[in-house]
Each structure stands twice: as C-alpha cells, then as structure tokens.
Amino acid sequence: MQREEANGKYLQNYKNLQHYTKGQIMVEIATKRIPVTPETWEKLSEMKRPGQTYDELLEQMIVHEQCIRFHDDMKKAEKDGKFIPLDEFEAVLETKK
C-alpha cells in the first residue's frame, strides 16, 4: 500500500478524534468541546504551563483527582474496618504457601 493511501485511511477513521499524519508523526486533534464559564477558562489558563496543552493540563488534573479519591477510599476502608494492614495480609499469604 502506498503512503498516500495509508495516510488517506487515517483521515477516514475517526469517531472522537480526527487523525492527520504529518511525515512520520501522527497528530491528534480532539473534536469534543467542554463548555466552561469565562472565569473557569481564565483559571485554567493561569494553571497551564508554557508549552502545555489544555488536554495535558486536564489529564494531569484527572490523575491528581484520582489519587485523592483513592486516598479517601483507603482512609474510609481503614475507618470502617474493611482494611487489612499490609503486614497482616502478607502473613495470611505466607500461611497459604
């Protein structure tokens, strides 16, 4: 298959993302939009580092929130007594060997 035909197939295959090839590098252009207030847009802009895309900023914020939720879930499990300390869990594993 020729390179032009392969590149053409990338242009045809998209649902949430449109794929455009530029040499050997594929650049993804998102097609989703998230409505935000001007105040929220300004705050996001202030958080964004030079050279960082909004997609990268949002991904970083998502990972941060996932970590916070995981920590909160672990604290809740510990408080509710549904948590087994690691050393106790390791001891249970040792007895099953």
Image (spheres, grey):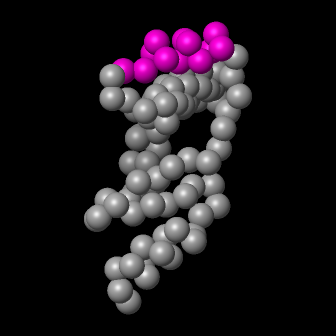
The picture quadrant where one finds residue 12 is: bottom right
Looking at the picture, does residue 14 appear above or below residue 66?
below
Asked whether residue 62 is in view, the answer is: yes
Q: In x, y percent, where is residue 74? A: 57, 26
Left or right relative to 68: residue 37: right
Quarter of the image with the C terminus in it: bottom left
Left or right relative to 9: residue 2: left
Residue at image position (36%, 21%) is 49
Residue at image position (47%, 44%) is 92
Looking at the picture, does residue 7 appear above or below residue 37?
below
Looking at the picture, does residue 21 appear above or below residue 37?
below
By secondary structure, the bulk of the magenta-drawn segment is best described as: helix
Residue at image position (39%, 63%) is 21
Q: Nearer the viewer, residue 44 or 78?
A: 44
- Numbered label tally: 0
Q: In x, y percent, where is residue 58? A: 52, 30
Residue at image position (41%, 41%) is 90
Q: Nearer the viewer, residue 70 or 11?
A: 11
Looking at the picture, does residue 95 appear above or below residue 4?
above
41 drawn magenta: yes
Q: In x, y percent, where is residue 15? A: 64, 61
> Which residue lies most toward the bottom here?
1
Residues shaded magenta: 38-49
Asked whether residue 79 is in view, the answer is: no
> Which residue lies most toward the left here?
24
Quarter of the image with the N terminus in it: bottom left
